[in-house]
Image: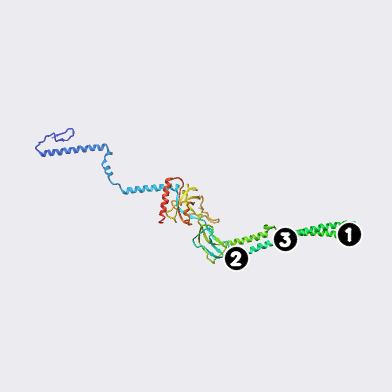
């Protein structure tokens, strides 16, 4: 057998075996196959050493054909959802803030009796709706009717007294005119007496009588003027400006007003609660007998965190979810945004300040009230004072955030069927 100078392996064809020997042929074939495998192995080793990055093509292809891990896929979806929700929470809290710290509020009016007396009628029941002008209750009017009659009589007497005073003034005026006329007459007669006295035709005593008569007439005139002034002072101003007339008229109006106040009416549309009277109850003037809840002017007070109200403005549209009406969304608008709350820890004068004992990693968020008015007429009748509300404020034309916010508030409206 000869060795091949190029490959360094034995060349079975160099030695010509005997064709008649099959055993020698098989050995030659096996030797040739082993030589070829060795050559292929050495070539692969050289190629792998020259390009190490291409040494693993088969495992990559094999791994690509393996099925994806479901846990890894679910984790990826959950992570994406968490990132999305966090991003939406951050932006939505500024551009479309939402809160469930909101309550329906309205005017609460204590109904009091303006006059004292025994209750003879109660025309409402607990938690009953009333309309403007409905009779709520009545006080016994007998005493107040008598007061009106007395006031009317007093007014008539005042009129009569004024008439008598007017007659007195007229009489006193006539007395003054009479005294003036008498004085003029006496002066004329006395002038003749004085002239005859100077001519010695009348005695001095006649002159003295004339002088006395003049003085008496002058005194009578002064007395008449005094009587006239006295009558005028007693009468006062004439007509409706007379103080006695005005006083009697005011007393009549007061008694009529008290009589009208024996019937108490509902001030506006609303409801009655906390009813505390029944027929026979004695009502004292000024004491509360029931509570009236107004229905026409309800609003919502929503307490937003301080970092939520930066973009909220008066007039911003609002979606309103009332717990009393699940599945429905009502419309409203921001009426005002609070700019001050009481957070003082100072005590009263003479006392020490109170120190808050809160602790923790994060401080409590300060909340400010935002007042929201209803724009949806269909919400009337659903304004229950103290009712819980969810509100979402749209602070601008942010289509993406506003759309997500609208979906969110509507999802809550359907969930409110269950809690």
User: In the rendered view, does 151 fall on the left or right side of 315?
Assistant: right
Number of residues whose C-alpha sits closer than 10 Å to that of mark 3, classed few (under 14), some (14–19) or many (20 or more): some
Q: Residue at x 27, y 39 (%)?
A: 54
Number of residues whose C-alpha sits closer than 10 Å to that of mark 1, classed few (under 14), some (14–19) or many (20 or more): some
Q: Residue at x 72, y 61 (%)?
A: 167
| Residue ID for mark 3 | 167
User: In the rendered view, does 85 fall on the left or right side of 19?
Assistant: right
Number of residues whose C-alpha sits closer than 10 Å to that of mark 2, classed few (under 14), some (14–19) or many (20 or more): few
Relative image position of residue 19 (x, y in whole percent): 10, 36
Q: What label does residue 204 carry, if any?
A: 1
Relative image position of residue 52 (x, y in whole percent): 27, 38
The quarter in which the C terminus is drawn is bottom left
370, 355: nearer the viewer: 370
Q: CA distance from mark 1 to mark 3?
A: 44 Å
Q: CA distance from mark 2 to mark 3?
A: 36 Å
Ranked by sequence position, the earlier of labels 2 and 3 is 2
129, 114: nearer the viewer: 129
Can residue 369 be spotted in the picture? no
Q: CA distance from mark 2 to mark 1?
A: 77 Å
Relative image position of residue 56 (x, y in whole percent): 27, 41
The reply to whether discs 2 and 3 touch (Cβ–Cβ < 8 Å) is: no
């Amino acid at each position: 057998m000869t060795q091949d100078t190029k490959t360094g392996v034995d060349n079975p064809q160099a030695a010509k075996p005997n064709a008649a020997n099959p055993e020698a042929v098989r050995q030659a074939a096996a030797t040739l196959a082993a030589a070829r495998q060795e050559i292929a192995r050495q070539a692969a080793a050289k190629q792998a050493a020259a390009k190490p990055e291409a040494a693993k093509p088969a495992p990559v292809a094999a791994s690509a054909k393996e099925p994806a891990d479901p846990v890894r896929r679910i984790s990826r979806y959950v992570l994406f959802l968490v990132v999305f929700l966090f991003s939406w929470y951050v932006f939505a809290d500024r551009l479309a803030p939402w809160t469930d710290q909101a309550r329906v509020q309205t005017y609460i009016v204590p109904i009091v009796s303006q006059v004292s007396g025994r209750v003879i009628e109660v025309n409402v029941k607990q938690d009953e709706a009333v309309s403007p002008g409905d009779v709520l209750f009545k006080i016994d009017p007998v005493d107040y009717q008598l007061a009106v009659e007395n006031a009317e009589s007093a007014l008539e007497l005042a009129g009569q007294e004024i008439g008598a005073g007017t007659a007195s003034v007229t009489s006193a005026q006539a007395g003054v005119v009479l005294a003036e006329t008498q004085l003029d007459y006496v002066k004329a007669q006395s002038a003749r007496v004085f002239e005859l006295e100077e001519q010695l035709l009348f005695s001095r005593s006649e002159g003295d009588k004339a002088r006395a008569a003049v003085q008496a007439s002058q005194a009578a005139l002064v007395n008449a003027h005094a009587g006239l002034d006295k009558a005028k002072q007693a009468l006062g101003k004439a007509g409706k400006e007379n103080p006695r007339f005005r006083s009697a008229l005011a007393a009549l109006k007061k008694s009529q007003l008290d009589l009208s106040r024996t019937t108490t009416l509902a001030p506006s549309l609303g409801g009655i609660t906390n009813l505390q009277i029944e027929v026979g109850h004695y009502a004292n003037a000024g004491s509360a007998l029931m509570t009236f809840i107004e229905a026409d002017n309800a609003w919502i007070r929503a307490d937003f965190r301080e970092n939520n109200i930066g973009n909220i403005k008066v007039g911003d549209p609002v979606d309103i979810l009332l717990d009393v009406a699940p599945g429905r969304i009502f419309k409203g608008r921001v009426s005002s945004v609070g700019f001050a709350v009481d957070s003082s820890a100072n005590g009263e004068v003479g006392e020490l300040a109170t120190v808050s004992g809160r602790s923790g990693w994060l401080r409590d968020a300060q909340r400010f009230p935002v007042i929201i008015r209803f724009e949806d007429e269909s919400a009337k009748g659903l304004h229950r004072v103290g009712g819980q509300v969810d509100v979402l404020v749209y602070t601008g034309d942010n289509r993406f955030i506003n759309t997500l916010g609208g979906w969110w508030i509507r999802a809550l409206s359907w969930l409110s069927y269950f809690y």
